[in-house]
Amino acid sequence: MVVQADDGAKALMMAAEGISAEALTRMARLSGTDPVVVLSGQRAEVLGMTPDARSVVLISAAEPLSVNHITRLSDPLNPEKPDAGLTVRSTDIPDWAQGAVALAKLSRLLPAAVVAPTTAEMADCFHVSAADVLSYRPIAARSLKRVAEARVPLADAEDARVVAFRPTDGGIEHLAIIVGHPDRDHPVLTRLHSECFTGDLLGSLRCDCGDQLRGAISQLSKSGGGVVLYLAQEGRGIGLINKLRAYELQDAGFDTLDANHQLGFDDDERTYLPAAEMLRLLGISQVRLLTNNPAKVEGLARHGVQVTERVPHVFPSNGHNARYLRTKATRSGHLF
């Protein structure tokens, strides 16, 4: 359990997917109030609780919420629907509620939390400000430092090095794969690649990630050099476990974007500020970007990296990923 504070107001919180009957009882006892649920706007929207997916909502009931109530609200893989008669608050949302969902996302958990507003001291609990949680991602990105590098010959690029970057709090590392000796006085051929355990390592046919990663390394080698930024943003930033949950929803009929919404996430939870910072630390200010995704071009430009050219990066579909690629084209604006 964590206490989040915001301008004197505070709440005891716990991730919804970790809640238990004992934890609910303890939260009520420590806080002096009945716990309520905070859902992301996307999750509340798919449940029909709000027309606006941009803000979190607070859910309460006349009687104290049970673990079963909370699971029905937060987990789309639960076959039972949420109870009727719930009270939904979608305006005047305190920052600690926004912070509760943000902290769950940072932890790669479902974006839902159980919270109990309180005035009690609770000196034994860990305290964090909502402002610190909400500003964590840009601060972590801007604090990236080069911490290690080594020569790593690759099957398609024997002249390659891997450079590791880590934020100053010791958080998640991102990697740069430098192929050859790119000329930094000219736009460098660059690929932003979000890690994909299933595609990159296992060769999954559900996506095109493995093809894109290996294809990019091969193309960089053939063209004389460049950089692949391997970003720790699995599943468009929702994490591996949530990606597997999304796969289960896709098997039930949802496309890749709607599955994310069912879980409570946005279309794409990634940020390209870490990529821009890594390029800056590598001395690269202009890139030719290997991508089919215009959002990556816009994301780098927003953070001060000049994209002089979008270089198409297309691979054939197979019987397992054709729908996935079609959704990327029709709903996410990818250019194939």
Image (cartoon, rainbow, N blue to C red):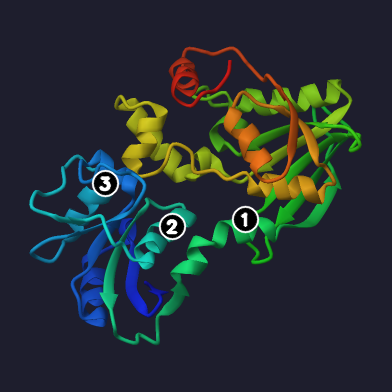
Q: Is residue 202 visible?
A: no
| CA distance separating discs 1 and 2 | 16 Å
Above-or-below relation of 256 to 275: above
Q: Mark 2 highlights which residue?
A: 102
Earlier residue among tags 2 and 3: 3
Q: Would you say 205 lies left or right of 156 here?
A: left
Identity, as a three-letter code, of the amino acid under mark 2: Ala
Q: Mark 3 highlights which residue?
A: 44
| Circle 1: element type | loop
| CA distance separating discs 3 and 1 | 29 Å
Above-or-below relation of 55 to 98: above
Identity, as a three-letter code, of the amino acid under mark 1: Ile
Q: Would you say 109 lies left or right of 165 here?
A: left
Q: Mark 1 highlights which residue?
A: 172
Q: Position of residue 159 (x, y in %)?
A: 89, 33
Q: Would you say 58 lies left or right of 230 here?
A: left
